[in-house]
Amino acid sequence: MNWIWWVLIAFWTGGFAWAADTVRTALRTRHKRKLQLLEAAREERLAVEAANKPPEPVCGCTHHLAKHDKQGRCHERVEVPTTWDENKKPLRYEAGRCNCQQYVGPQPLAQVFAEELTDRM
Ligand SMILES: [Zn+2]
Ligand SMILES: [Zn+2]
């Protein structure tokens, strides 16, 4: 066989391997992109769900507003530390009541600002 054939065969196989590698890389990249798109779509859906959900009526004391009476006093049971160790870490707890007084003042967003009318004529 002529030596040129060996050169050609080497070229073909090398070229084929390169082509196969390129296709494989492209497929892998596309697969990764698809996964990324799926992940993005999932995150978007979660964000939309979170946005559509009404805000939890939770008081500043972290207890649900349903635990508060009409006067705003919280009735949730809490653990009150009674003894501490030398590192100020509570050792024993006693059952107590949350002494939160729910804020019942004016809502800042409910305020209406009446702008003064200016005469520009
Ligand atoms: Zn509260
Ligand atoms: Zn509370």
Image: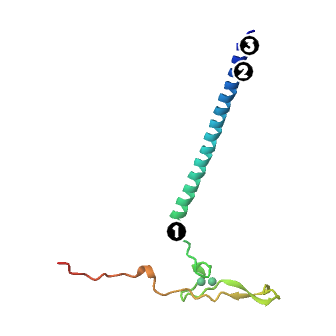
Front tag of 1 and 3? 3
Q: In the rendered view of the protein, which quadrant contains the N terminus?
A: top right
Q: Kindly report the distance in space between the C-alpha atoms of the residues bearing marks 1 and 3.
A: 79 Å
Question: Which of the four quarters of the rendered structure image does ligand 1 lie in?
Answer: bottom right
Residue pointed to by mark 3 = 3
Residue in front for this viewpoint, 101 or 10: 10
Queried on whether the Cβ of the residue with tag 3 lies below 8 angstroms from ligand 2, the answer reads no
Residue in front for this viewpoint, 49 or 15: 15
Residue 90, horizontal then vertical, whole percent: 78, 85
Residue pointed to by mark 2 = 10
**Element on which disc 2 rests:** helix
Marked residue nearer the N-terminal end (1 or 3): 3
In the rendered view, does 110 fall on the left or right side of 48? left
Residue kind at label 1, given as amino acid type:
Pro
Marked residue nearer the N-terminal end (2 or 3): 3
Which residue is found at the position 60% from the left and 51% from the top?
39
Residue found at the far right of this picture: 86
**Element on which disc 1 rests:** loop
Q: In the rendered view of the protein, which quadrant contains the C terminus?
A: bottom left
Residue found at the far left of this picture: 121
Mark 3 Cα-neighbour bin, 10 Å: few <14, some 14–19, many ≥20:
few
In the rendered view, does 97 fall on the left or right side of 86? left
